[in-house]
Image: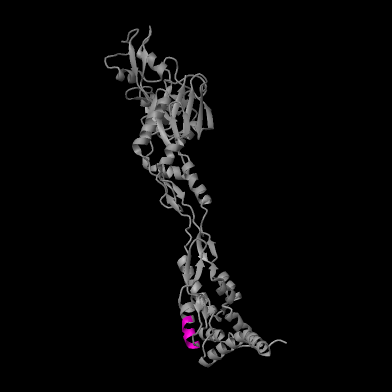
Amino acid sequence: MPDLNLWWLVVLLFGLVLLGPLLAVSGTALYYKETERIFPGVRSGAVLLDNQRVSSAAGQLDLFWNQTPNFVLSNGGKTWPVPPSSLGLWIDPGATAQKAYQVGRGEDGIVELLRLFRRKQIEVEPVVVFNAQLARDALTQISQSLSSAPQDSRLVLGQDGRWIATRAQAGMTLDVADALAQISADPQATLRQGYFELKIMSVPARISDWSAELAHINTFYERPLKMFAYDAINDERIFWNVPQNLVADWVRLDDPQGQPYLQVDVEQFQNYLIEWQTGIGNREIESTQALESLSAKWQSGETFEILLRHRASTYTVQTGDNLVGIGFKVGLPYWKIQEANPGTSIIGVGRGQVLTIPSPNEMLPYPVVPNKRVVVSITQQHMWIYENWELRSEYKISTGMDKSPTLPGVFQIQTHELNAYAAIWDLWMPHFMGIYEAVPGFMNGIHGLPLLSSGKRLWGNVLGSKASYGCIIMDLQAADDLYNWAENGVVVEIQP
């Protein structure tokens, strides 16, 4: 039979093994209850609260959670730490410390104490008090530091003087409403995560497209500078446009919403005209409108007008030639040729001699009226009157007899006399319009049927055949009409 004392010793030792931890836990609990301290192993985040009284723990909790930047914010490219309180996540330090103090003292106190006894920690989630207004204010302030304003596209003058559009750049801003909604949905979970991603929104530029305005502006650079040259001798009209690349260099637009104008390089423009006239034969530019009008003409779409002049030419004398006959060939009075060739006489020219023939424009002393023209045919004994290059009227006429012929050529109405008197023939010429001097001081012209001093009207029955002493004869009504229509400067072209 076993020794009874030994058995009781075993029972006692076994009891001590079983009751020892319980007694130790009970003793520890009794100690912490009496001293009002938080049990060892209790923590909240990185704050270890063991052996601390509630008031001391509250101070440490406030320092860590509400004042230390241990919460991380990110905008996708950058991170930075902030205190949770800066987002409205305020930790109640007293309530959290009290919560830590209750570990091991509540309904599950024994279990919690055993867990602590086994050297396992217990995490106490901080008591979060969410302040939505504080969060909104804080997020708004963060947004101001993160945001960048969008840059609108602008129209600016480029180096070539043309307007171009700068590229629009979008801005960015924090989506405060989205961040506030996420945090307020579960403040505790937000704090537990310890990290919050801020949603950055793109802010589009208000103005990003100037294509319509640029298309409109570019029409200015494509607007033609219209030119018009008139040759009064040939009655030729030449229309063309200045090369657009040249015009585009002259276009100026001080304000993209304003009106363009031309700033013309005068020397460049004149050089262009000099080059242009090399392609128009034995002619040159006689005059142009004022260069100051170029811009206005360009803006309104009107033509810039140029008058052409024929250059002087030469004539080689043939056998049997004299100055009068040569004048009829080239359309000039003989004395004009004589003036251009000092030392010559009417018949004093020899075969092979080269004569200078003045420009036919010498017979146009007045400014040309370009939209009116009188055309006479000696062969057909007919007159056509044109206005704006359209036939206005036509008449049967009589030119000079063969022994006193009318000179063919291009002339100009130079004088108006209501009733001129020709003493050499003792006759009156109604509605007389002088057109050229057959000899210096003797003007041939156009007029109505002449009247002798005796009262006899001449040539009324011979219109349509040569009858005069060199003038062009019309019936009275036709001469009256022409006299009142054709001012000085109207060109009269007399064809052979």
Relative image position of residue 203 (x, y in whole percent): 52, 62
Residue 422 appears anywhere in the view: no
Write down the region rendered in magenta: 54-60
Residue 227 vs residue 141, the one in the foreground? 141
Residue 386 appears anywhere in the view: yes
Relative image position of residue 356 (x, y in whole percent): 33, 17
Tell me: 97 left or right of 293.
right
Residue sitting at the far right: 1
Question: Does residue 10 lie above or below 260 as drawn?
Answer: below
Residue sitting at the far bottom: 34
Q: Choose top left, top right, bottom left or bottom right for residue 109.
A: bottom right
> For residue 59: magenta?
yes
Relative image position of residue 138 (x, y in whole percent): 49, 74
Question: Does residue 441 lie above or below 251 as drawn?
Answer: above
Tell me: 365 left or right of 53.
left
Q: Choose top left, top right, bottom left or bottom right for residue 178.
A: bottom right
> For residue 66: magenta?
no
Q: How many marks?
A: 0
Relative image position of residue 182 (x, y in whole percent): 59, 72
Residue 267 vs residue 140, the one in the foreground? 140
What residue is rendered at 38% in x and 17% in y? 327
Residue 189 vs residue 343, the one in the foreground? 189
Tell me: 339 left or right of 326.
left
The quarter of the rendered structure image containing the N terminus is bottom right
What residue is rendered at 51% in x and 91% in y? 35
Magenta span: chief secondary structure: helix
